[in-house]
Image: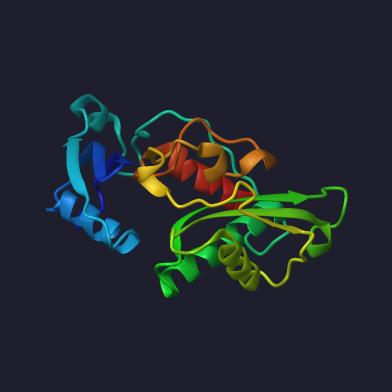
């Protein structure tokens, strides 16, 4: 609605509460709580969230200095790094790309077959960097998934193995700690941008000083980092 909107907004989840906090200056008319509830209902349709909105407009001093056109300044400080590699189509390191694709496959299954997996998952990929990037370099894939208590751990392991036929029995380690039935915001407090290393390039490259979530392009830790990656 307003391309010149200035946005620096965070989202925090804990239990059944969602908190939106930050600064948004815009001419657009948006019901922030309604948008949040729509997204939350897609993620956890069985749950009713309370949404608390703590959003004000951007400081007028900052606003005066921020880019209204291409001749004015940036809206924040930041350290920016751009990284790319020809190891994968995504231009990300093979191990990082593989971990992303594992989580994507789990998400797709959760959406298509709700009720078995609960949407929370973690993966750790061990890759031998002395070998050529590819399936042969994968030494271990650990996958932990949050699941419905109606399913025992052996059933969960069997199901996850069917999702990843490309890995051998020796390569794949599933829920090594056993059952995991309480996950998401019920188990952990989640805040956008808290894990900038994971959101950027993991430990394969330097990362900047800020996260990229919830920001408009006047924030250089968002726009300049993307531009640096494009150049790389």
For this view, does 148 lie left or right of residue 139?
left
Along the line of sight, the residue nearer the viewer: 182 or 78: 182
Along the line of sight, the residue nearer the viewer: 64 or 95: 95
Q: Which residue is drawn at 30% across and 43% down?
A: 15
Can residue 183 be seen in this snapshot? yes
Residue that lies at the very extreme toward the top in this rendered image: 61
Along the line of sight, the residue nearer the viewer: 178 or 94: 178
Q: Residue at x 62, y 61 (%)?
A: 90
**Up-down: is 105 above or below 183?**
below
For this view, does 118 lie left or right of residue 39?
right
Quadrant of residue 222 within the rendered picture = top left
Q: Position of residue 10 (x, y in %)?
A: 32, 39
Q: Where is residue 216 in the image (x, y as percent from the top left)?
A: 34, 45
Quadrant of residue 138 within the rendered picture = bottom right
**Up-down: is 178 above or below 192?**
below
Q: Residue at x 58, y 38 (%)?
A: 81
Q: Residue at x 45, y 52 (%)?
A: 181
């Amino acid at each position: 609605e307003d391309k010149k909107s200035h946005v620096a907004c965070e989202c925090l989840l804990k239990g059944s509460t969602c908190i939106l906090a930050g600064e948004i200056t815009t001419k657009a008319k948006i019901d922030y709580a309604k948008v949040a509830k729509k997204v939350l209902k897609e993620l956890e349709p069985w749950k009713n969230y309370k949404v608390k909105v703590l959003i004000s407009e951007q400081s007028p001093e900052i606003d005066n200095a921020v880019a209204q056109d291409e001749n004015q300044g940036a809206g924040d400080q930041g350290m920016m790094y751009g990284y790319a590699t020809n190891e994968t189509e995504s231009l990300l390191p093979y191990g990082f790309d593989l971990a992303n694709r594992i989580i994507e496959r789990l998400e797709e299954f959760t959406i298509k077959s709700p009720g078995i997996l609960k949407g929370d998952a973690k993966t750790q990929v061990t890759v031998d960097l002395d070998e050529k990037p590819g399936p042969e370099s994968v030494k271990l894939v650990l996958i932990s998934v949050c699941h419905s208590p109606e399913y025992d751990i052996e059933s969960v392991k069997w199901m996850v193995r069917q999702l990843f036929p490309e890995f051998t029995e020796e390569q794949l380690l599933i829920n090594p700690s056993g059952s995991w039935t309480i996950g998401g915001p019920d188990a952990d407090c989640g805040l956008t941008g808290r894990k900038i290393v994971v959101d950027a390039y993991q430990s394969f490259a330097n990362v900047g000083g800020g996260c990229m979530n919830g920001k408009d392009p006047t924030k250089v830790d968002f726009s300049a980092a993307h531009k640096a990656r494009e150049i790389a």
